[in-house]
Amino acid sequence: MNSIDLIILNLNEVRRRSLKVWKSIPEEAYNWRPDINAMSCLEMIRHVLESEHYYHLAIKNQGSVPDFESPFTNRPLISPEDEVDFSQSLRDEFIKTIHTFSENDLSNIQIDRSNVGYIRELGDMLLRIAYHESIHTGQLLDYLRSAGVERADIWD
């Protein structure tokens, strides 16, 4: 297995576990949030999916995307399944893009997001995308615990 395969494996494993959590959220908890300033469960799922799309575009652009137009804008928040279904083609394109990179690209391509405080090598950026999703999956598990909702077992 090469580095590209490992990065894709990591992204897919993080998503597989996220899906277990997302799909286990009961409808009555979709809009639950720990406080008024926090994202709801559905908003957090959308945030993860929308961010992945933005990061994909930033990778293709090798930097920030100043005129980002989100395909999620004006879409109603309905359910985790609806969010995942809508974003699946975006995810497929993201994974397809990763397959186009070489081992050398992982350290030689720089993603310049200095406008938000960083420049990262492509490999670092790809790992951070998976990390971002996993952090929010952990947050959702905490949300469900706080809401008194049974949580999916992601430790298989």
Image (cartoon, grey):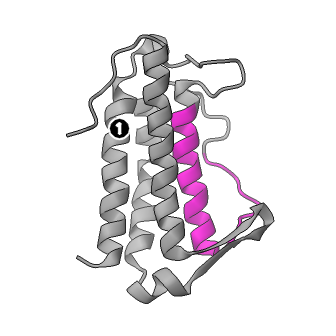
In the shown orientation, is residue 100 left or right of residue 69?
left
Q: Which residues are magenta?
A: 44-71
Q: Amino acid at mark 1?
A: Leu
Q: Quadrant of the C terminus?
A: top left
Task: Please name the residue shown 41% across and 49% down the image.
Answer: 88
Query: Closer to the camera, 72 or 104?
Result: 104
State the SS at label 1: helix
The residue tagged 1 is: 19
Q: Quadrant of the N terminus?
A: bottom left
Q: Is residue 90 visible?
A: no
Q: Quadrant of residue 4?
A: bottom left
In the shown orientation, is residue 66 left or right of residue 134?
right
Q: Quadrant of residue 17?
A: top left
Task: Please name the residue shown 44% across and 45% down the image.
Answer: 134
- Main SS class of the magenta portion in the image: helix
Across and down, in percent, residue 155 comes to 25, 38
Across and down, in percent, residue 100 comes to 41, 79
* Position above or below: 54 against 154: below
* Position above or below: 74 against 53: above
Asked if residue 52 lies in the magenta stretch, the reply is: yes
Asked if residue 124 lies in the magenta stretch, the reply is: no
Task: Please name the residue shown 60% across and 65% down the image.
Answer: 57
Query: Closer to the camera, 95 or 122?
Result: 122
Across and down, in percent, residue 92 comes to 39, 59
Q: Is residue 154 visible?
A: yes
Task: Please name the residue shown 55% across and 16% down the image.
Answer: 32
